[in-house]
Structures are given as C-alpha cells and as structure tokens.
Amino acid sequence: MKTQLRFTVFALLLSLTSLGAQTAHVVFAQDFTKGLIGVNIDAAGNIWATENGSGNDDGQITIIDSTGKKTLFMTGLPSTFIQAAGEIVGSYRTYQLPDNKVLIVVGEGTNKLSETLLIVDKTKFKGTPLTLADVEKVIEHGKFIHGLGFVQSNPFNVDWDKDGNIFIADSGANSIVKWHKGVDTFSIVKTIDRFANPFPYGPPMVDPVPTKALRYSDTTFYVSQLTGFPFVPGAAKVYSLNTNGTMRVHAEGFTCLTDMSIDPLDGNLCVMQFGVFGDVGGGTLNFKLGSAAVIKLKKDGTRDTIALGMGGLSPSFTFDGKGNLYVTDLVFGQILKFSLLTSNREIPQIKALSKAYPNPAQDQVNIEYEILQAAPVTIGIYDLSGRQVATYQEGKQVPGKYLFQWKGVDSKGQGVPSGMYMYRVLAGRSQVSGLVQMVR
C-alpha cells in the first residue's frame, strides 16, 4: 500500500528536542480529542473545526464563536482505523455553502459514506448535534475514482470555480478532480506524476500527494503537495494548474504542505507546513515536534514565515480578515490564534527558561518556566497519541520564575512506563511545550 496523507499516532512520534518559548500566539480553543484536522471560518466569524475521529465512526464538527465557546454541530461522521497500517482516516474539512448549507469532505475509509462529499442544511441544527441521518446530498467521489482503476481515493480538500464546480485534491489518487455542478459528474483535471526517491530507504518512487486546489483566477488554481514517505525535505511544490490540465511549478523548496489560503489583507498566498520529517535522535526518522509553520509567498518573490512555534504538528489554518490567523495543532488538540497586526496582539503571559531536565529521566523531571503576567496555570502531560496522562492545576500565579516537578506518574498516581511524553504549560491563553523521555 502506498503511503499517502493520513494523520495518526505514527505522525506524532516526535523529536526529543525541547521547544523554546511559544509566545507568538494564544490558545483560542482546546480539548479537541478526536484528531483535529480542518479549520474554516463562516461569514459571522465563527470557526468550524473538523475532527476525523478515533476510528469508530466518531468524527465530529464543532463551532467556536469569537469568545472561544464551543458548540458541537455534528457527530458520528465516518472514521476508520486501518489495522494493517495502524492509521485512522475520516472527515477532514467543513466548508460554508450558499443557502445555509455546509459541505463536509470525507476521506478514505470503510464506511459507506467514506470518500464522499456530504452536504448538510445548517438550519436543521437546533442545539442537538446533527448526524449522518441529516445529510441531504452525497457526492460520490470515491466511486468515480475507483471506477477509473485507481486503488486508493482520499479526498482531502476542495475549492470552487466561479461557476460553482468543485475542484477536489485527492491525496490517494494523486489527482485534482473536478465535480461538475448541475450534472453531478466528474472528470480528472490532472494526475501528478511520482518522482524518484533520492534517499536509500523507502520506496523507489515518491507519491506527490496533492493536498489543496485553491482558486486564484477564473481558470487557474494553486495546488499544494505533501509528498509521501520519506517526506523529503524541500521536495514539496506549489503548482499553478489551469483548468484545462496545463500545470507548471509556481514555487518550490517546501516541506510537507497540507493547506493554502490567500491573506485577505494583502492578497498574498500562504501555505501550511505540517511539519518537518527527519532524524529525531539516535538515527530515528519521524516528524519533529514544533516544526509546523505558515509561510507567506509575497508577490515580489520573497517569503515570510508568519506563524511558527506551534506546539505540535499543524494540518490547517484560516484567516478572519481582521488580521488574525487561526492554526490547528493536531498533537495538543487545540486551535491557536496569531494576531498578525501589531495593534491586535495580546501580551504573552509565559515564556520558557530552559529545557526540561534531566532528560531522559528515571523518576522526576524538572520543568522551568516564567510567568510574565498573572494568570491561572495548568500543566498537562500527554503520551504520543495525544492522550492526556495527567493534569495539574497550579492556580493563579503572579509574575516570576517557577519550577514544576513531574514525578513520572499518571492522574491516578501510578508510575508511567518508559517512553516519550509531551508536556504543556498553559498560562491563561499562552503556552510553552516540549518533550521528555522517561526511562524505567
């Protein structure tokens, strides 16, 4: 089975390198425990967060208002655990449509509604979460793809042309697919070729794995790519794709792109770097914690990293048109808010002082941090699946330097097994995070 875009526990085996201060953002919403993938915004400024579930047809969509209040909109979305690969696939994105409709992008899986686009009427929502029984239209994307002989289909992201036709990035079929509105038919716009693997490990050819088709003119789309295993650093490109299938490289030298958007304030293209894959110590190769970034491609050809220092790995982002950027953090299950305009920025409440030590540790880990403004402090310990192992409410702390000692136990006071663990120190809406290793 070829490696394609899936977000799983294996994508969370991260670097042992401790992170520096996480002061460029605040935590806008948190406690997303079912694989936070997609984030989009509606006309009223509400954030729509899509989780792909735990593999038990339990994907869900949550609406977050401007204050950070969460309302569960829909539950029971397709979510499949692929045992052979140890991977979870499911629902990825939710988009706003005219006439109070939403479109849900459902990726690969075994549910009868996997590999489809689902349309739901928002007016049916009266406070009780909607379910699959409320779906009013199913666009059967996967059936078309498999009918052409493709082994896999994994619709991941979409955009529309001026006539309302949908352009689908299928990361399983390595293709951009057009759904023709009104006649409910499909056509392949472009299938992207594999390229030679430059490394001595992994398959001889690497899958391009397109992740987004983003319209920027009546006849042209940008296309981003992740690239499959071994996730070659610098191999990902942004293409310019004409609707007639003509494609050229627009920009290159990126690593593992999973999303794109146009900054509404200056019209520049921005891309999401999910994370960097490489040596995380001891010859182990995997994604590195905190290596996600949002990069702006300016019209003069230069590039500017506008969001960096997310605690984990980030699949998606969106703008609100008011100078704010919202980025998902898959590892810690949270949405981070970056204020790109100086006048909007919140003063950070915490900063890191040093690495957690000793690291590795046998019995106790010391975590140092500094409070810059008085704030309630919560310290969480997580395993590499994102499951919370223990949480500690430290109360409101005044400005100053602090030392927290984790004694290597879970919430029941039981010693945790050997392995890597993530810590997060949350002060108000600011945070620092990193990794520690326990050796028993």
Image (cartoon, rainbow, N blue to C red):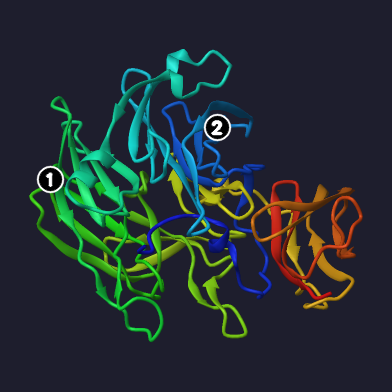
Disc 2 residue type? Thr
> Up-down: is 40 above or below 272?
above
Q: Secondary structure at mark 2?
A: strand
Q: Is residue 37 left or right of residue 357?
A: left
Contact check, label 2 and label 1, Cβ < 8 Å = no
Evaluate whether residue 152 shows in this view: yes
Residue type pointed to by label 1: Thr
Q: Quadrant of the N terminus?
A: bottom left
Q: Nearer the viewer, residue 393 or 269?
A: 393
SS state under label 1: loop
Between the C-alphas of marks 2 and 1, the distance is: 33 Å
Of labels 2 and 1, the one closer to you: 2
**x%, y% of residue 322?**
46, 40
Q: Determine which residue is flagged by label 1.
A: 219
Residue 310 in picture, x, y percent from top left: 58, 59
Question: In the figure, is residue 239 to the left or right of 360?
Answer: left
Q: Nearer the viewer, residue 126 or 172?
A: 172
Image quarter of residue 56:
top right
- Point 85% across, 70% down: residue: 365
Look at mark 2 in the image and give the residue it sits on: 62
* Mark 2 residue crowding within 10 angstroms, few (<14) / some (14–19) / many (20+): many
Determine the residue positioned at 60% across, 57% down. Answer: 24
- Specify the quadrant that holds the C terminus: bottom right
Q: From the viewer's perspective, is 169 left or right of 133?
A: left
Looking at the image, is mark 2 or mark 1 earlier in the sequence? 2
- Decide if residue 325 is in sight here: no
Label tally: 2
Please tell me in which quadrant of the rendered image residue 143 appears.
top left
Tell which residue pokes out farthest to the front in this image.
84
- In front of the other: 369 or 197: 197
